[in-house]
Amino acid sequence: MAAETPRVFVTRRLQQEVLDRLAALYRVDLWDSDMPPDYDSLRERAALADGVLCLLTDRIDAALLEAAPSLRVVSNMAVGTDNIDLAAATAGGIPVGNTPGVLTETTADYAFALLTSAARRIVEADAYVRAGQWQTWGPSVLLGRDLYGATLGIVGFGAIGQAVARRAQGFSMRVLYTRRSNAPAPPDLNAEPAELDRLLRESDFVSLHVPLTAETRHIIGERELALMKETAILVNTARGGVVDQDALVAALRRGRPAMAALDVTAVEPIDARDELLSLPNAVVTPHIASASVATRLLMANMAADNLAAGLEGSRLPNCANPDVYG
Ligand code: NAP
Ligand code: GLV
């Protein structure tokens, strides 16, 4: 391969077919591990690269971008880009790719799975059976909450929020939503806009689907949790930072809201001794909402497409900082 062949840093072991695709075109510097590079290694290897294909666990900050004089594109294998300093990338003329759309349905499936498992206490029920506690069918054993006919509040009504609303129709749920803009909901979703406070007061389930930004950090804090119904269930498949986790632990201890089902936490991975994990009314999974075989392959290929476009000097098919093009 000629010396002028672009050099790309790929920060994790990806699906082999995607790595083969990249290796056919570029000099690939692969972080050949299932664990992320530490920040210093990330910065050193990015400094030598023309393009970086990274994951949401990689912090791409201004210092890293400044130390990478040849860098022409950063391609994130995720829709969320809160791990990347987009303003610094734009200032440096570096387009940032992300992977919207291909993970929408898979993530919405998972949000609904978390909602259902919390409402019907599936995780707890499985533990109950395994612990030999199942003695008989009982009229009051492991009673949960109905989805059918309940009110679902969706915070962030973009691609995933709307896909969750579509699923809610199958359960005859009433859907309230809040979003940043006044854009109306597609009429077939039968969803009603509501201010956040009203949504929190009236919902039996609250599902979070906003990106993590300066505006959405801790959008659900002590005050907002106190507005929720005592019987309500909070579902978070967005980002841990959207919820004030200390306030959530205190609220769950008091029993309002009744439960939380979280795919994301303030710090990832969460410490196994974290107080949150000692609560019987919390379900926590390891950031896997988009983790289906098919979707992860689509995401990796979309990230490779963005990387290729950036290296060719073409507009990225999915660009998280379109201002970079002026
Ligand atoms: P999206 O289509 O861009 O939707 C984001 C929604 O959030 C939009 O409706 C937007 O409002 C709303 N929003 C943004 N800022 C807001 C604010 N300050 N207040 C209220 N609403 C606000 O994104 P998406 O594809 O649905 O993804 C959403 C997020 O889910 C991602 O950013 C990512 O962090 C997370 N995610 C997590 C997983 C996982 O594995 N757990 C998987 C995929 C995605 P407008 O519509 O008015 O602009
Ligand atoms: C996953 O969390 C994503 O943002 O794609």
Image: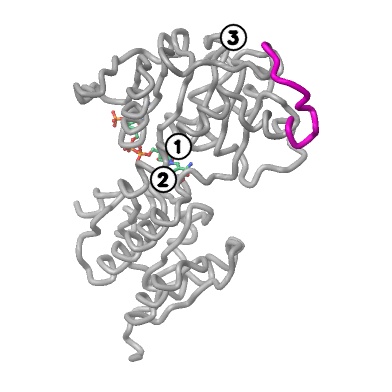
Would you name the residue on which mark 1 appears? 212
Would you name the residue on which mark 3 appears? 230
Disc 1 marks a residue whose amino acid type is Leu
Secondary structure under tag 1 reads loop
Give, as a single range, the part of the protein colored magenta.
128-139
> Is disc 3 in contact with disc 1, using a CB cutoff of under 8 Å?
no
Give the quadrant of the N terminus. bottom left
Disc 2 marks a residue whose amino acid type is Gly
Image coordinates of residue 290 in percent, x first then y, are 45, 47
Mark earlier in primary sequence (1, 2): 2
- Tag 2: Cα neighbours inside 10 Å, few (<14), some, or many (≥20)? many
Left/right placement of residue 24 relative to residue 280 reads left
Label annotation for residue 80? 2
Q: CA distance from mark 1 to mark 2?
A: 8 Å
Quick check: is 132 in the magenta stretch? yes
Image coordinates of residue 161 in percent, x first then y, are 36, 31
Q: Is mark 2 within 8 Å of ligand 1?
A: yes
Outermost residue to the front: 136
Q: Nearer the viewer, mark 3 or mark 1?
A: 3
Image coordinates of residue 267 in percent, x first then y, are 62, 42
Q: Is mark 1 within 8 Å of ligand 1?
A: yes
Left/right placement of residue 150 relative to residue 310 reads right
Magenta span: chief secondary structure: loop
- Tag 3: Cα neighbours inside 10 Å, few (<14), some, or many (≥20)? some
Kindly identify the residue that appears in the image at 48 percent across and 19 percent down: 205
Q: Relative to 319, say whether 120 is above or below.
A: above
